[in-house]
Image (cartoon, helix red, strand yellow):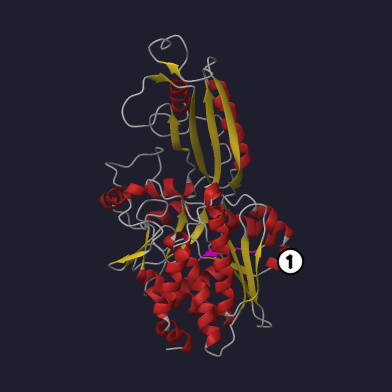
Amino acid sequence: MAPWEKYLIEHKERFMNELFDFLRIPSVSALAEHADDVARAARWVEERLKAAGIESVTVMPTGGHPVVYGEWLHAPGKPTILVYGHFDTQPVDPVELWDSPPFEPTIRGNRIYARGVSDDKGNMFIPIIVAEAILKTGASLPVNLKFLFEGQEEIGSPQLPEFISANKQLLRCDMVLSSDGAQWAEDQPMVVLGTRGLAALFIDIRGPGHDLHSGTYGGTIANPVHALVHILDTLHDHEGRITVDGFYDDVRPITDEIRAKLAELPYDEAQYLEETGSPRTFGEPGYTTYERAGLRPTLEINGLYGGFQGEGLKTVLPAAAHAKISCRLVADQDPGKIIDLLVRHVEKVAPKEVKAAVTGNPSGAIPYLIPPDYAGLKTASAVLKDIYGKEPYRVYMGGSIPTNALFLEHLGAYTIVFAFGQLDELQHSPNEFLRISGYEKGQKAYGHLFQRLGKE
């Protein structure tokens, strides 16, 4: 066993306590009342990187939530690896569905429960303590390392494109390792060949100038909730196809080779339904579940609200109704174009008796693909095989990691998703958790990957 591995074991309890301190910070980037908490999390990461022996550590402004940068560049002739992650979290609602307070980490069985533990605080903590373990045991890091941790990934990284573009020289690297992601299962690794892009928008429907008595005015004035439901119903057909004109125009077809590779992945529909709690699968005809989840675009209603929301009945005709929509995009779709298509669609189908306003969220994400034969991907695959004793599956991830395409565009560097949560760990849901086994495998995997990249 290498000295750095012994160090990780000897300091295991301290590291867990530190992770719990990190998880207690409610760094919810989507909620304005938590902006100070996001900044507090950034300062925590800054101090933790310094304690690990990383140099030039600083919290950097973006115009929104901050980023934290640090570096260790004392391996001449060796590759420079940029490690990426994020310290912001999703909101916790509905909080009543949590079995323990979301920002009071709790261990039950082999799992740590807390908001952000899998996505992404637990995962981004791993490369920090691995770097510390190597440096504190008298060795030099086998590669040059740069760290970039952001505080706005959960809201689409709106200021990050400009930040990366303005700091190309600072961030210049040979390859990126993203701590934001997952493995297939506790005993099965995977490598990610692509992540989907993202486009989001808000629909606001206005009718009367204020809520009206539904008896006095019902049937004479258009109800904004009715109008919104009509608009939303025009976005798909009954089989799940998106019916917005032009939505599929730029979608890259799935090749026979890719379909064959995806068909090799194990799929148990009963298990899939058990994980989701759904009675049956649903989606665009002509595609398998994995094809729909990773290589076909989506349009989802994320929130729908209007009128009286409290307990009991209040007989009003609401003045307004609202919907939040997100689209997961695939190569070669453009978020800006998709938003334009949706704006035109809503304007076309909205009833004339109401006023419809559509606002596109500027923080979109470009779809990302990595060449299957990329050398760094082969190295990461070899390390995962050594750790898990199995060849990693090669998958296309349904979620979005905005930075993947940004690093390729601005730095010319491919990103390898190297994270050790799992797909079923309730990221973005109540009772989010991280398996301790994955947390520990990740430490070993990062150490071995750094060593192997230094040799190759």
Identify whether 251 is placed above or below 414: above
Residue located 69% across and 83% down the image? 76
Residue placed most toward the observer, 324 or 198: 324
Residue placed most toward the observer, 91 or 273: 91
Q: Please provide percent x and percent y for residue 149.
A: 58, 64
Numbered circles on residues, count: 1
* The N terminus lies in quadrant: bottom left
Residue located 47% across and 64% down the image? 121
Q: Please provide percent x and percent y for residue 302.
A: 45, 39
Q: Please provide percent x and percent y for residue 228.
A: 47, 25
Identify whether 261 is placed above or below 307: below
Residue placed most toward the observer, 266 or 50: 50
Residue at disc 1, secondary structure: helix
Identify whether 4 is placed above or below 351: below
* The C terminus lies in quadrant: bottom right
Identify whether 123 is placed above or below 400: below
Q: Please give the range of residues in magenta.
A: 413-417
Q: Please provide percent x and percent y for residue 445.
A: 46, 75
> Residue 247 sits in which quadrant?
top right
Asked whether residue 374 appears in the rendered view, the answer is no
Main secondary-structure element of the magenta-colored stretch: strand
Identify which amino acid the numbered label 1 is placed on: Gln
> Residue 305 sits in which quadrant?
top left
Asked whether residue 219 appears in the rendered view, the answer is yes
Please tell me whether residue 27 belongs to the stretch shown in magenta. Answer: no
Residue located 40% across and 74% down the image? 440
In-image side of 426 versus 51 (left or right): left
Q: Which residue is mark 1?
A: 169
Is the residue marked by circle 1 packed among few (<14), some (14-19), or many (20+) residues within 10 Å?
few
